[in-house]
Image: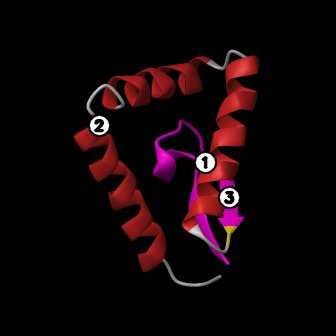
Amino acid sequence: MKTMSCIQLGGACELEFKANTFEEIAQLSKQHGMEMFKAQDEAHLAAMEKMQALMQNPDEMTQWFESKRAEFNALPTD
């Protein structure tokens, strides 16, 4: 099990997610993002705008995603 925060994953808060794989932690982050979108949390909405801009360039998005995967893989196990 490894831990990453919302902010480490491009979000806006220190909420921690724990998962065994990067795919699992990405899914937890996505669910949190949807909750924050529904709540219209301003800080998270601003972070989402940055992500949407990044998604306009598929190469940059892939590079960002792979850098986060590498960051997850380099973390020590909890």
Q: Residues within 10 Å of mark 2 (few under 14, many from 20)?
A: few
Which residue is label 2 attached to? 58
- Hey, what amino acid is under mark 1? Glu
Look at the image and tell me whether residue 15 can be seen.
no
x, y (%) of residue 24? 66, 61
Residue 17: which disc?
3
The reply to whether the C-beta atoms of the residues labelled 1 and 3 are less than 8 Å apart is no
Precedes in sequence: disc 2 or disc 1: 1
Q: Nearer the viewer, mark 1 or mark 3?
A: 3
Q: Which residues are magenta?
A: 1-18
Q: Residues within 10 Å of mark 1 (few under 14, many from 20)?
A: few
Q: 56 or 51, which lies in front?
A: 56
Whole-number angstrom distance, CA of label 2 to CA of label 1: 27 Å
Q: Residues within 10 Å of mark 3 (few under 14, many from 20)?
A: some
The reply to whether the C-beta atoms of the residues labelled 3 and 2 are less than 8 Å apart is no
Which residue is label 1 attached to? 14
Instruction: Kindly identify the residue that appears in the image at 32 percent across and 31 percent down.
Output: 54
